Amino acid sequence: MNKFEQLGLNESLLKAILDLGFENPSEVQEKAIPLLLEKDTDMVALAQTGTGKTAAFGFPLIQKIDADNRNTQALVLSPTRELCLQITNELKNYSKYEKGINVVAVYGGASITEQAREVKRGAQIIVATPGRMQDMINRGLVNIKNIDYCVLDEADEMLNMGFYDDIVSILSDTPDEKSTWLFSATMPQEVARIAKQFMSDPLEITVGTKNSGSSTVSHEFYLVNARDRYEALKRLADANPDIFSVVFCRTKRDTQAIAEKLIEDGYSAAALHGDLSQAQRDGVMKSFRGRQIQMLVATDVAARGIDVDNVTHVVNYQLPDEIETYNHRSGRTGRAGKLGTSIVIVTKSELRKISSIERIIKQKFEEKSIPSGIEICEIQLLHLANKIKDTEVDHEIDNYLPAINNVLEDLSKEELIKKMVSVEFNRFIAYYKKNRDISVSGGERRERGDSEPREFSNNGAVRYFVNIGSRDNFDWMSLKDYLKETLDLGRDDIFKVDVKEGFSFFNTDPQHTDKVMDVLNNVQLEGRRINVEISKNDGGGRRDHNNRGGRRDSGRREGNFAPRREGGFRSDRNSSRDGGSREGGFRGDRNSSSRREGGFRSSAPRGENGGSDRAPRRSENFGDNSRPRRSRRD
Ligand code: ADP
Ligand code: MG
């Protein structure tokens, strides 16, 4: 007997569940389903987004509906058209082996007469948005006076969106004896008020901590000046070549404007907001699901209920007015057990909101600084190198090779690599060369007594690069712990830990440098030698620590394809910030197929050995096979 059978679900549902591929019930399903099946009761169920709430009410609802009776027996209210359609679709899937159950979606922006006709044909379950439902009631197109069940799905969202009056009015049109099931990710006061007003003695189910965000999501904020918001967004995108994100703006106008700017700058972006026609919105969502769009710029309302897996980042371009909304934004990533990052671009005056959000999500934010041009160049270069390495060769090309070889035959392998990478990369360097550092230090956070004051200043610190990262199952906290233990250093001795997929950066004070270099370069992680070196990007550009042991050797770099940094193109404050933006977009890199193929799959982002006691090796970045590789592809 599988776990779903134990919950008391009938044959036809179990069969449908088998088709859905659900193996085990989620926690909220395990808790809610038996209770709802057992008796007619009111229920309040709190669970984060992505925890399977639809099935938690959907399975029992289908089982309880009388298929032989064609009257409307259940009403599901949900905040948006998208969710409404999604739920309808799910309910249809659940009931596919149950003859005679009709589920009808009722939502704005589509023909009301058509929807009324469908309802009239017999809809035991109506899934509706509050606005359209109210409209249908007013026009006498539906009858919900005899329903047995009313589900308020994503109740907090509906109330956030200002549907309080509609909900109250709709509920007063339903019989008192019905059962009301309220599902919500959070329990703000308004939701509690609805529960109190319209429910009697509800059973309460809570999954995880109340109000907490999903633990698969890590939260970061980047402090910038208001005028640098957009530049910051671009840099974050550039620093994450594989980004697949929802970018939230506060207004439709900003949403449209930011999307347009991104497109102009060569990013695969699109806007999603309420001023678009239904067809346009559907088109955008289709492209997003199909990964033709890497950055979906959206308003809160339009993005509600977006259920797209594998979103890597949620970007709060602007924080929402209602702090509660933050949870819903960040819930767009970290779904289905995947890890996700929720980023906030924040100005000093908004900083206190971060603390309020931390209290709500019961998770700490990590303050990070906007990557410098150098850091981005580094990341993009490695991305490019990996892309070259992973590119599959179409043998059509063989026909042209003799001619190509003819042109290139005088170049050594090193020269060839350098030139090839430069084809793509010169634009990048040209762009970031002109760009200043836009990080702002976060004095306020420090005054608030946060644990890591030094995160905010790189003064005097040494920045390291190490060839382990998230693919080795590290996040910044676990890497910090690991380094602390391995190096026998105190918690505050290691800071500014920044974990990328195949590598990471961290800082220490200079007095620990010898220890870091000696110890770390001689340890192994699961059989792989750790390679640490001092990053020429010292994290703040204030000092040059790279002369230790003669490691700063530009000749060594020549063998690789790292940009030449001696020119110091970090803080050229006089150059025009926007001058290079068109070049800065890395157009060629942004189609979906290359994004999927890309990533830091090579386990050794730099092929050289930075240990002070070893001679630097050269030009190993391409096809460095010297280290075991994990084949992770996601
Ligand atoms: P919520 O309403 O809590 O945000 P959903 O009901 O939309 O979550 O479910 C999120 C995703 O998880 C959906 O893709 C759904 O198909 C899937 N899902 C739900 N229950 C299960 C289960 N028991 N096993 C596997 N996947 C599930
Ligand atoms: Mg839901």
Image (cartoon, rainbow, N blue to C red):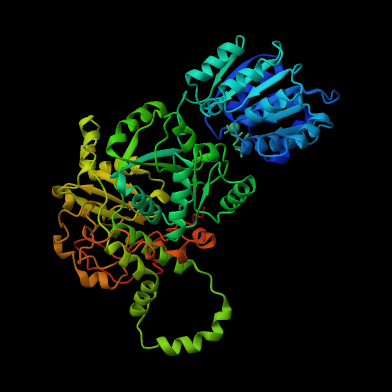
The quarter of the picture where residue 440 lies is top left
Q: Is residue 605 above or below residue 460?
A: below
Split into 4 quadrants, where in the image is the N terminus?
A: top right
Residues 216 and 48: in front is 48
On the image, the x and y values in percent for residue 241 come to 43, 57
In the rendered structure, the answer to whether residue 401 lies left or right of residue 465 reads right
Q: Ligand 2 falls in which quarter?
A: top right
Number of marks in picture: 0
Dividing the picture into quadrants, the one containing residue 535 is bottom left
Between 459 and 414, the one lying in front of the other is: 459
In the foreground, 595 or 269: 269
For the point 70% across and 35% down, the residue is 88
Percent position (x, y) of residue 362? 39, 28
Whether residue 94 sits left or right of residue 371 in the image: it is right
Residue 531 coordinates in the image, percent (x, y): 29, 57
In percent of width and height, residue 302 lies at 55, 40
